[in-house]
Image (cartoon, helix red, strand yellow):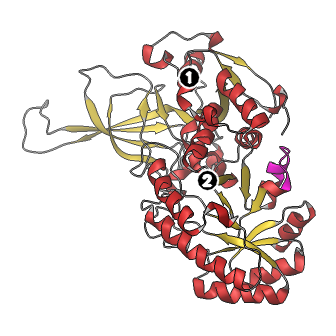
Amino acid sequence: MNGFASEDFDFSFLEEGFSARDIVEQKINEVSLSDDKDAFYVADLGDVVKKHLRWFKALPRVTPFYAVKCNDSKAVVKTLAILGAGFDCASKTEIQLVQSTGVAADRIIYANPCKQVSQIKYAASCGVEKMTFDSEVELMKVARNHPNAKLVLRIATDDSKAVCRLSVKFGATLKTSRVLLERAKELNVDIIGVSFHVGSGCTDPQTFVQAVSDARCVFDMGNELGFNMHLLDIGGGFPGSEDVKLKFEEVTSVINPALEKYFPVDSGVKIISEPGRYYVASAFTLAVNIIAKKVMITEHTGSDDEDDAANEKTLMYYVNDGVYGSFNCILYDHAHVKPVLQKKPKPDEKFYSSSIWGPTCDGLDRIVERFDLPDLQVGDWMLFENMGAYTVAASSTFNGFQRPSLHYVMSRPYWQLMQDISEHGIVPEVQDLNTIPVSCAWESGMELNSSTCSSASVNV
């Protein structure tokens, strides 16, 4: 994409020395005297750029096709489009979103093995040819409705070590794969490669090794039948934050040797992937406000001293976002969230066993079951970090509670770096992440004012 105007984004520039966390603090200060203390996000698009650089440093042979379902914010999609990423779309609406940012059809893979006929026809009409399948019924649907399709056979994997398993729903076995390839030959459908997904939150990187090995077997089957097999899609499942047991580079250090063994550079096979949470999880911070509070006293008999610890106090806090909103990640994505207090507690402040609840009238709307917190008050703020993945995309307005507002920021160095990548691609010296200035304002406790960030544009 050559050039882009400020109208392409709706974000604010971070002034030198300030971070997205400082903007959270600033926005809290802005409403400190108001009763309207609505929940809100601050998202650092510079963090997305940083993740892009980190990706190519760790997986230089693998082209990322961002999984739109993870976070379909147009600012995120636009940022990745400018950076040159591809996109994994699962529906007509996601294809429309991506193409509305100027992304060419060949940078999209329609990675849903179960597609509605009308949406297959839509993909055909707008030039999207790469798409996945894992059954004979899907193969025949595509053959009838998209004669120019370039199909990728999705195979099942061992996802028993993943938090969110996908092979229970998608993927063909190796035995079934041969049958499907033979049927594709009869139907004169073009098969160009293989895809797999080891599941989200994969805790064993060796799962990737076995999946790559299985993909090699299916490649060989396809080549034997005369298909030009030239695309391998290694799916997603990559961590997007540092609060995980298995770090990103620990996964990629296992993947690279497997790719070199089974699909060496001279094989001519193009390798892509479908990262979602990797790109966006750590970029989003959510601020929620305490709207109600309940003090629960657990009385124990056998003590005459009213001040005795036998009478235990537990606290229930109610905040203005919940599992039907941003915290749907708890239900859908098995997320474990932890609050960060906006006000730092005093060194000698007592903590109590506490629970945190959403605002709806449903008893299911519990965010945190048990967490030690000080005695907070209505109007105090809690922050939740790493809230970019599977949060805003699946939130609802159940019970009439509105979704949190979104505020995007980016530092000028990352903005300039994004332009450089757009024009010249990623060059080795650009991959040194340590060359980008890091904010010290939050740690130093600097006082913020209206000049902390300046508006860069309007209307994504």
| Mark 2 vs 1: CB contact within 8 A | no
Question: Residue 144 lies in what quarter of the image?
Answer: bottom right
Q: Residue at x 48, y 25 (%)?
A: 379
Residue 95 x/y as whole percent = 80, 56
Residue 190: % across, % down: 81, 77
Three-letter amino acid code at disc 2? Pro
**Residue wearing tag 1:** 19
Q: Which residues are magenta?
A: 96-105
Q: Position of residue 349 (x, y in %)?
A: 26, 23
Q: Which residue is mark 2?
A: 275
Q: Residues within 10 Å of mark 1 (few under 14, many from 20)?
A: many
Which percent across, then down, holds residue 227? 77, 79
Q: Amino acid at mark 1?
A: Ser
Q: Is residue 114 visible?
A: no
Task: Residue at 61% x, 53% y: name it.
Answer: 275
- Is 121 situated above or below 53? below
Asked if residue 309 shows in the view, the reply is yes
Judge whether 86 appears above or below 57 on screen: below
Quadrant of res 428: top right
Q: Is residue 103 magenta?
A: yes
SS for callout 2: loop
Out of 276 and 11, give the one closest to the viewer. 276
Q: Residue at x 77, y 74 (%)?
A: 228
In this rendering, the answer to whether 334 lies above or below 308 is below
